[in-house]
Each structure stands twice: as C-alpha cells, then as structure tokens.
Image: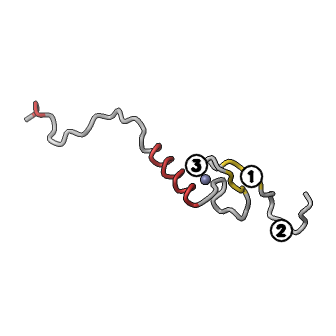
Amino acid sequence: MSDSNQPSTGFAPRKVRCPACAGTSLYSPQNPYRPFCSARCKGVDLGAWASEEFKLPDDTPPDEPFGDPRLQ
Ligand SMILES: [Zn+2]
C-alpha cells in the first residue's frame, strides 16, 4: 500500500490463479483476459466450457429418416 501513483480504478490488482493453466494471472483492469493470464488461456477455457455445454446427455431417440417401416 505504498504506491500512490496508481490510478483509481475501483479495485486493486491482485494475483489470482489462471483457471486455464493454473498459472499466475494478474487480476487487474490492465488485464482484459482476467481472470485468465492471457488471450490464449481465455480461448482455451471458453472452448472447454462450450464443448462441455454441448456434451449434455442425449436421451432423445434419433430421428427415423424413413419413418416407421411397419407403417409402409
Ligand atoms: Zn493461463
């Protein structure tokens, strides 16, 4: 708390753990990728999140493209 040259940004920068690479990330207004450490980590995490979202269990039966053969 000795640096008085910092602009008033609302919150103080602090080091957090990057959710993607578990490395050190600077959680600050200067880091647009927070809480990630880099754009790459942010992209990786978003990709994993998206694939998880689309990996929901599918218990609906697949469409029968030709219909029920017993009806023909
Ligand atoms: Zn990272």
Left or right of 45, for residue 51: left
4 or 58, which is in the foreground? Answer: 4
The Cα–Cα distance between marks 1 and 2, rounded to whole angstroms, is 18 Å
Task: Name which residue lies at 63% across and 54% down.
Answer: 36
In the picture, which quadrant includes the N terminus? bottom right
CB of residue at label 3: within 8 Å of ligand 1? yes
Say which amino acid is labelled 3.
Ala
Residue position for label 1: 15
**Counting other residues with Cα less than 10 Å from the Cα at mark 1, is it few (<14), some (14-19), or many (20 or more)?**
some
Give the mark toward the camera: 1 or 2.
Answer: 1
Left or right of 4, for residue 63: left
Quarter of the figure with residue 32: bottom right
In primary-sequence order, the first of circles 1 and 2 is 2
Residue position for label 2: 7
Give the mark toward the camera: 2 or 3.
Answer: 3
In primary-sequence order, the first of circles 2 and 3 is 2
**Above or below, 64 relative to 34:** above
